[in-house]
Image (spheres, grey):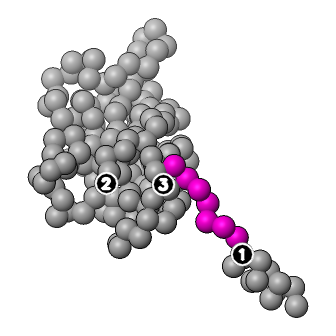
Amino acid sequence: MAGLLGLGLSGCLAEPTYSSTPEISFNDINLTYRPNVNQSSDSVNIVINYQDGDGDLGLASTATGKAPYVRRYANNYFVQAFVKSTNGQFVPLSSLHRGFSADSVNGYYSRFDPIVADNHGAPIKGTLKWKAIFYRLQPFLPGEEVRFQISVADQALHESNTITTNSIIISK
């Protein structure tokens, strides 16, 4: 009897009301050292939580290069790296001028596919996972403390809030 009552109540619950502008929050970050004879690396995995009121998160590969999905919005997952300086403040990796390409120091932008295939306009909530491999000395130095700022955009080009991850120490 209790099982049926629970089922009946769940059918009466209203859909959550989220903003049509995506909202994200930090969930987890971890670093895995990957030793290699030729070139060692660190694998950084970041998990964020999301919620979006109209369910239009994600960008189909067919949208690339079409208005309005050009330049910045050719991607929808925006990651910027920050390194702890000698004075204890986190500074953008781009300000350190280490001789790497502009793409690698200005941001690690990427894309994730649509979360809901038919974009039915219903609220959605879940987690997104991002992974990057950083090779030794490219762009972080061993022992550096690093954290990331992240935001996402939906198909209507609403940009989420920006979150900051916990920091990690690059392997020595």
Q: Give the number of marks.
A: 3
Instruction: Look at the image and give the residue range highlighted in magenta.
Output: 13-19
Dot 2 alpha-carbon crowd within 10 angstroms: few under 14, some 14 to 19, many 20 or more: some
> Residue 93 appears at what percent x and percent y?
31, 24
Which mark is drawn over residue 52? 3
Front-lying residue, 125 or 148: 125
- For the N terminus, the quadrant is bottom right
Residue 129 shows in this picture: yes
Q: Quadrant of residue 107?
A: top left
Amino acid type shown at disc 1: Cys
Dot 3 alpha-carbon crowd within 10 angstroms: few under 14, some 14 to 19, many 20 or more: many
Dot 1 alpha-carbon crowd within 10 angstroms: few under 14, some 14 to 19, many 20 or more: few
Work out whether 172 lies above or below 95. below
Please report the residue visible at 19 percent of the width from the left and 49 percent of the height from the top: 69
Q: Quadrant of residue 71?
A: top left
Kindly identify which residue carries mark 2.
155
> Residue 147 appears at what percent x and percent y?
44, 32
Residue 132 shows in this picture: no
Q: Earlier in the sequence, mark 1 or mark 2?
A: 1
Kindly identify which residue carries mark 1.
12
Mark 1 and mark 2: Cα distance apart in space: 30 Å
Q: Earlier in the sequence, mark 1 or mark 3?
A: 1
Amino acid type shown at disc 3: Asp
Q: Is residue 61 left or right of residue 49?
A: left
